[in-house]
Amino acid sequence: MDLISSKKKLSKQSKQQSKQQSKQQIKLNSLKNYFEVSNKNILTKVKTYVYVICHDVSKQIKNIQNAHKIKSIPKTFLKTPESDDIRTLYLDDSQIIFYIIGKTQRCDVEHLYYSYGIVGKMISDLENSGKYVIVNLNNQNEDSLSIRNSVISYVLGFYRFIDLKTDVSMEKIPKTYFYTSKIKNKLIIKSAIEEALIQNEVRSLVNLPANILNTETYSKYIQINIPSNLKCKIMNEKDLKKHGFNLILAVNAGSKFEAKMVVLEYNSNKSSGKKEKRSEKISEKGPVVIVGKGVMFDSGGYSIKIGDMSDMKYDMTGSAIVYGLMKMIAESKVEGHFIGLLPLVENMVSSKSIRPGDVVKSYSGKTVEIVDTDAEGRLIIAESMSYAEKWKPSLCIDIATLTGQAVTLFDGKSSILIGTNNTMNQKMIQSGIVNQEKIWELPMWESYLQYTKSNIADYKSYPLESKGQIISAAAFIYNFVPKGSEWIHLDIAGVEEVRYDYETRHNGASGEILRTLYTFLSHLRKPIYANK
Ligand SMILES: [Zn+2]
């Protein structure tokens, strides 16, 4: 990424620097050509072969031995272990890595997802993987979901954030071929690679620090990197003022960058004339609006955060998820009408920042008392919800790293869902299961709305008297959901980040909930994954 064109510019005054940085164009290492499908198992120049083997090791390894014309294999390789084991066989000019699923584990979608994550991460960490790696998918579960999830998990496990490292040589990164002899699997693998690469792009955006990715460079990046069938409109500060998005402007008041609202729109009705009749039925019910919280950095404002803030660049994850999601929807031409709203701000401290206790008139006309300036996410989401009304949506979804309580409740292992329609809620949870992403549902009882009433304004942003911050934050947003629309709220605080390297992933942004949302939206009016 050409972030700064020369070191000299870095040393100049900060104002000038920020001006230059906002003009800079961000390019990410997408590794787009590093993953492919192949129906040739033995390519010349391949150094590393990977086989994930389930249970009956001896028979399968013997088949592999014949295929590779290996004279002898150590006896220890042929024994099925109790728990998962990785064994490497070194040959003259190549190596074969066996990931063996142990007797105590099942060879189901979930465990394959885990195993391929380990393999992907291991390959990206290997010093001697060579230029090409072949991952053989021929001898595993044949159902399409297993194949899809295995490939996705490998590509996600392989990912490392390398864009700001100067010592990574792109030439040394191996290219992976997923081998299958079955034609029907080729398409599944191809689209799995595409899904995973978009998730990795989202992760890179989230991993970029706030001195590089700000509201200006970010909105420009989105504009350049979306497919041509996705409409993009960017409102700048002047537009936001004109329309009266005062809560968004209030949150951003302390930042040196302009607040933005990115509007992404995809309508399958308009992009394909032939399908018009069928799609009309879908759009009769009104489009789906998806809002993603885009706080580039959250210092908390005057209600400043205590302790380490270095992970506060992650506070724009919701918006990056919406960007990735809209891209997936447009690229795979999902039927329906979808609008993505990305309110982009930075919550900073300056003499222009809002104060705790200030009252601001929102886009909806309602007044809001700002109790705690660190409760800023709900404000920009509320404005976006009010704005969504113009499309008369049938469903509004918001995605946000919203509350600290969501992090502690499940220790970053589950997203939290609150919604108005039980069937849709269950479908979202089901979509999560399909993608190995956990979602836990919490209620929105009438009594929680009491918390959002202010003594001096219509609403207050933060109820000091509430101990249930996950729900009271959602309750504030609920007040602004367009009339006639269903609503799903996803608090992803905690799951957006892999805090430490673990078996299947390198640390950093996770991009979690993206594929769940994609599965949900692409199956809005049909059942989720019949296993075929
Ligand atoms: Zn905050």
Image (tube, rainbow, N blue to C red):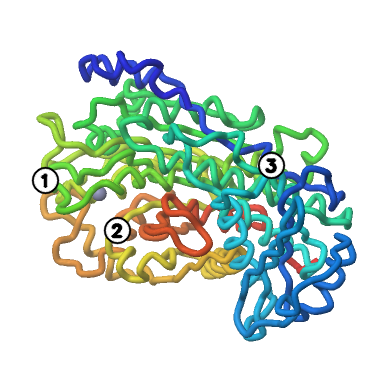
Examine the rendered structure and indicate whether residue 254 appears above or below residue 422: above
Decide if ligand 1 comes within 8 Å of the CB at mark 1. no
Q: What is the crowding at mark 2: few (fewer than 14 residues within 10 Å), some, or many (at least 20)? A: many
Observer able to see residue 262: yes
What distance separates the C-alpha of mark 2 from that of mark 1?
18 Å
Which of label 3 and label 2 is nearer to you? Answer: 3
Observer able to see residue 418: no
What is the secondary structure assignment of the residue under circle 2?
Answer: loop
Examine the rendered structure and indicate whether residue 3 appears above or below residue 293: above
Query: Would residue 107 appear left or right of 510 to someone viewing this image?
Result: right
Picture residue at 57% right of the left edge, 57% below the top: 122
What distance separates the C-alpha of mark 3 from that of mark 2?
44 Å
Label located before the other in sequence (3 or 2)? 3
Q: Nearer the viewer, residue 97 or 152?
A: 97
Picture residue at 60% right of the left edge, 41% below the top: 173
Check residue 131 in the rendering and tell me which mark sits there, or answer none.
Answer: 3
Check residue 356 in the rendering and tell me which mark sits there, or answer none.
Answer: 1
Quadrant of the frame with the C terminus: bottom right
Q: What is the crowding at mark 1: few (fewer than 14 residues within 10 Å), some, or many (at least 20)? A: some
Decide if ligand 1 comes within 8 Å of the CB at mark 2. no
Which of label 3 and label 1 is nearer to you? Answer: 3
What is the secondary structure assignment of the residue under circle 1?
Answer: loop
Q: Which residue is mark 2?
A: 403
Q: Report which quarter residue 415 is drawn in.
A: bottom left
Label located before the other in sequence (3 or 1)? 3
Picture residue at 76% right of the left edge, 68% below the top: 530
Picture residue at 85% right of the left edge, 73% below the top: 62
